[in-house]
Image (cartoon, rainbow, N blue to C red):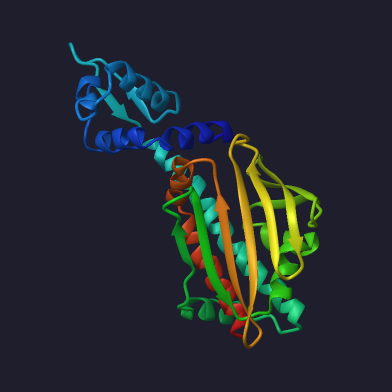
Amino acid sequence: MAADALSRVFSALADPTRRDMVARLAVGDATVNELAAPYDVSLQAVSKHLKVLEDAGLVSRSREAQRRPVRLEAQVFDLMTTWIERYRRAAEERYRRLDDVLALLAGRRLPHPRERSVMTSTSAREAQIVADPGVPLVRITREFDAPPAKVFRAHTDPELVVQWQGPIGVESRVEHYDCRTGGSYRYVHTHDGEEYWFHGSFHEVRPAELIVQTFTFEGMPDDVALEKLVLEELPGGRTRLTATSLVDSFEGRDAFLASGMETGVQEGYQRLDALLAR
């Protein structure tokens, strides 16, 4: 699925009315009049919603005698699931690589793969992921058994970033990564001949303490997130990480949460726990 097609699908599903129509069509086909019945809007408004869904490939219309039912195209969701699952696995692999980077920084032995799988599966700590009710923001809070300086360096040194940022099956290449106040970054993920570019600017960087940056997926250039990463030192050489991502709308925020990001965050942080337990 091309990046522009994915953009159309996620943009179409960002609207709650269109998501409700999709949910109703999942039960069975319906005409425009039937779809419009629960809403206090005109048939023209419902038709415009359906046109957006149709342009995204999510629904199609057919003719049966005097009826023109709208039908859900389920195969599009299979393509979306494949795309989301790819990046869920990417998040898992990124944090496994971050485990290894932090181990190298600490001068510790890297585990045998069998040891790694056992320790990953025994971690019980979970990140807290909260959608703010007042603003379109996601907040992630997590504690790690590593000092802030090591976690900070693994996120800011491009030679280290590229080691754990590249997921399985995806080639990661940094065009530039100038992690300082006023700096910028741009990198690409390549998979099956397709390129996924990301870029942003660093607004404030304070070593072992704070990173404030913008984040843009170039396949959806109008959607810019403002991200803030705060590292807080805890007793015993531990770190509390608080990350926030502020987007343009509640619809965009909710679509982000519905994309499967929670699984990638939780499992990625569990892999990080495995490193810190050694």
Q: What residue is drawn where x is 67% and y is 48%?
A: 214
Q: Position of residue 4 (x, y in %)?
A: 57, 31
Q: Position of residue 104 (x, y in %)?
A: 75, 77
Q: Residue furthest front?
A: 134
- Comparing 249 with 106, the one in front is 249
Image height check: is 190 above or below 74? below
Q: What residue is drawn where x is 31% and y is 35%?
A: 22
- Comparing 242 with 145, the one in front is 242
Quarter of the image with the C terminus is bottom right
Q: What residue is drawn where x is 76% and y is 64%?
A: 206
Q: From the viewer's perspective, is 262 left or right of 23?
A: right
Q: Residue furthest top?
A: 66
Q: What residue is drawn where x is 40% and y is 40%?
A: 77
Q: Position of residue 183 (x, y in %)?
A: 80, 51
Q: From the viewer's perspective, is 152 left or right of 228?
A: right
Q: How many marks?
A: 0
Q: From the viewer's perspective, is 66 left or right of 9?
A: left
Image height check: is 271 above or below 245? below
Q: Position of residue 38 (x, y in %)?
A: 20, 30
The quadrant holding residue 93 is bottom right
